Amino acid sequence: MKPVLNTLDVVVADIAASIAFYRHLGLDFQVDPSYAEHAGCDLPNGLHLMLDEEKFTSTARPGWTRAAGSPPIFLAFQFDTPTEVDATYAELVAAGYTGSREPWDAFWGHRYATVLDPDGNGVDLYCPLPGRG
């Protein structure tokens, strides 16, 4: 049997702040009723995205510490049109989140932008440019 990647787990400092950020992308996280420091969201492609506060992670994984360096990870979200990429980037920046790279037409054929979530993780917003793929 080959392993199946079906879940990503992102460690966050403040679960409420992270849920608020990802809500701007249309993600509906459900906080675990047994552990307020853990939340999950089912994505349309079958992937499950989890958020775990640092204190939850350090309890579940003794000896865990946040890695140095920034950003720890990048998540990439595909949109249907360049207009949606631009509008979502503008909405997130207007809501007070840090824009890392303004929308641009990347040489590989995508409209691309990057915003940082509350923990400094890169969140890429992209879509294929018309006629490019």
Image (cartoon, rainbow, N blue to C red):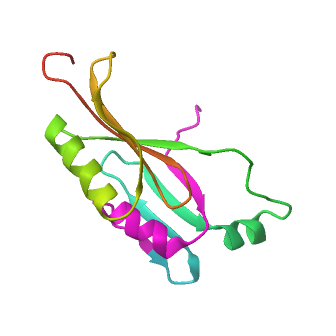
| Magenta region includes residue 60 | no
Name the residue: 29% across, 30% down: 104
Q: Position of residue 46 (x, y in %)?
A: 37, 48
Q: Position of residue 124 (x, y in %)?
A: 39, 41
Residue 25 showing in the rendered view: no
Name the residue: 33% across, 66% down: 28
Residue 89 vs residue 122: left or right? Answer: left
Choose between 87 and 9: the one closer to the eye.
Answer: 87
Which image quadrant: the N terminus? Answer: top right
Choose between 104 and 65: the one closer to the eye.
Answer: 104
Q: Position of residue 2 (x, y in %)?
A: 58, 31
- Quarter of the image for residue 71 reads top right
Residue 29 vs residue 56: left or right? Answer: left
Name the residue: 86% across, 61% down: 63
- Quarter of the image for residue 24 reads bottom left
Residue 52 vs residue 130: left or right? Answer: right
Choose between 56 and 84: the one closer to the eye.
Answer: 84
Q: Which residues are magenta?
A: 1-30
- Quarter of the image for residue 61 reads bottom right
Q: Is residue 56 above or below residue 10?
A: below
Q: Position of residue 42 (x, y in %)?
A: 38, 58
| Magenta region includes residue 26 | yes
